[in-house]
Amino acid sequence: MTLEMKNGCLSVGEARFFSGLNFRASQGETVCVQGSSPLACTHLLRCLLGFEPLSEGFISIDGSVLTPASAATFRRLMAYVPRELLLPYSSMAQAARAPFRLKANARQAFSTEALLQEWQLLGLPSSLLDKQPAQLTDSQRLRAALASASLLGKSILLVDAPPTRPDSAAAQFIDNYLHQLASRGTAVVAVSADDVFAASCNRIVTITENPNQP
């Protein structure tokens, strides 16, 4: 399965977030998205999800073009970890189950045992299950969200960068995990300012537009 963007351009009012963007991400590959504007990177992921239409160009999966009518079908093939992880839950155990309660994921079975196996790969102790999300660091919440997203078994994973950059140890867990997911057959598209991670990816997508300029 291959996710592809051809000549992608997104303008909102007088702000142009990106233009002439071309890339693809196939199963088993990692693609790093970088740019001076975190907002532009977020807009790119939202376009891939079908939440925002491109101003020019198109997005496709295996040659089928993303349209307003097909957006919901496309999203069933994707897991998404957003930049802002607002988790209104009483515990991380409850937060971990939340994606499985969505209609699109109703057929996916949740397993605490499987979750904790993923947490171990991400350097998260099982004791965090009983913690409130607000008690965790941004990095811990991101890693927990990655684990839940991976258990959904989607073909494509989109990951936005967290508001604060993880420390080196946490970043290493995250980078290694994303590559492990790719080795399992997932197409990974991740926003990251980490040049070490970028260099290890199959390709890098660089957004150079300045959305503050018309």
Image (cartoon, helix red, strand yellow):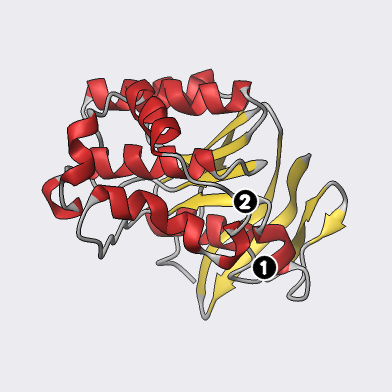
The quadrant where residue 188 appears:
top right
Q: Is residue 107 left or right of residue 33?
A: right
Q: Is residue 148 left or right of residue 1?
A: left
In the image, 108 versus 25, the foreground residue is 108
Name the residue: 20% across, 52% down: 133
Task: Give the CA distance from mark 2 to mark 1.
Answer: 18 Å
Helix, strand or loop at mark 2:
strand
The location of residue 77, given as percent across then percent down, is 68, 51
Name the residue: 46% across, 56% down: 99
Q: Is residue 142 left or right of residue 42?
A: left
Q: Residue furthest left?
A: 135
The location of residue 10, given as percent across then percent down, is 60, 66
**Residue 212 visible somewhere in the drawing:** yes
Q: Amino acid at mark 2?
A: Met
The N terminus sits in image quarter: top right
The quadrant where residue 65 appears:
bottom right
Q: Amino acid at mark 1?
A: Leu
**Residue 37 visible somewhere in the drawing:** no
Tell me the number on the disc at residue 11. none
Q: Residue furthest right?
A: 63
Q: Which residue is mark 2?
A: 78
In the image, 5 versus 214, the foreground residue is 5
The quadrant where residue 202 appears:
top right
- Between disc 2 and disc 1, whose residue precedes? 1
Q: Which residue is mark 1?
A: 54
Q: Residue furthest bottom?
A: 13
The location of residue 130, given as percent across then percent down, is 18, 45
In the image, 101 versus 31, the foreground residue is 101
Disc 1: CA contacts within 10 A as few (<14), some (14-19) or many (>=20): many
